[in-house]
Amino acid sequence: MGTEIIGVVGAGTMGNGIAQVFAQSGFSVRLVDVAQPMLDRARTSIEKSLGRFVEKGTLTAADREAALARLVTTTALEQLVDADYVVEAIVENADAKRMLFVSLDAMVRPAAILASNTSSISITMLGAATKRPDRVLGMHFMNPVPLMKLVEMIRGQATSAETMATAADLCAKLGKTAVEAADYPGFIANRILMPMINEAIYAVMEGVGTPDAIDTVMKLGMNHPMGPLALADFIGLDVCLAIMTVLQDGLGDPKYRPCPLLRRMVAAGHFGRKSGRGFFTY
């Protein structure tokens, strides 16, 4: 009995991208969200994304229809009772995730694996909230999920080798490259990315360069496809601040102190692209 039915909880940008890649790869997918409008928006954006693949010629129209037919959206968490594997992609909040893992643990089959798409929250803590910590892991996809090849797989303190192997096998079926990270704050991606973004913000605050100058140096000098400040605007400055706080609290080193300018911009409601204004105007 392999992994056939995939549950995805949370129909935001990440959740619908994750649901899409599983459906595209032949899995039966149930996408759950508390809000029906979120589910409607998710289906529309998945249809658009698959449509772009068809236009590019990387997906046939028949495959697109088949993928959409494999995707069920629902507001009922109970629809996941027979899921083999569940990926949680709700808000990046430890308490909300913990409560969801308690509910999922009580509902899904004992053999089912529970994965979190968290980018910085402790997998060990989420596993400990369940009666199956050996079957809990982190599966951190990158945005936009249909295009980005990496999945950061996080092994909690109690995660079994079998669980990691099942997850690695799924990544291969999705055409993704899995990289294993230990369960320390920020894992690999954000442990390295966020301090770089934070340092770029310090450079703005201290007048080392304009946002445009800093991003140009990183793009043309370091060959980054996007400068750190434009990337921070894309991620959301509120999210960047939350992850820096996780790093600072979890590692206790002053080098992870969020830049005061970052705090001030978030307090002003300048979150980047989603609010129309961050280091750049949108």
Image (cartoon, rainbow, N blue to C red):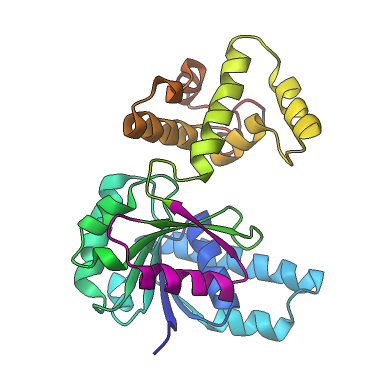
For the magenta stretch, what is the residue range?
Answer: 156-181
Q: Is residue 176 magenta?
A: yes
Q: Is residue 72 visible?
A: yes
Report whether 115 appears left or right of 266.
Answer: left
- Residue 270, image x, y percentages: 53, 27
Q: Is residue 267 visible?
A: no
The residue that appears at 79% across and 30% down in the rendered structure is: 221
- Residue 89, image x, y percentages: 42, 57
Q: Quadrant of the N terminus?
A: bottom left
Q: Quadrant of the C terminus?
A: top right
- Residue 152, image x, y percentages: 50, 55
- Residue 243, image x, y percentages: 43, 36
- Residue most toward the bottom? 1
Q: Quadrant of residue 216?
A: top right
Q: Is residue 37 above or below residue 230?
A: below
The residue that appears at 75% across and 21% down in the rendered structure is: 213
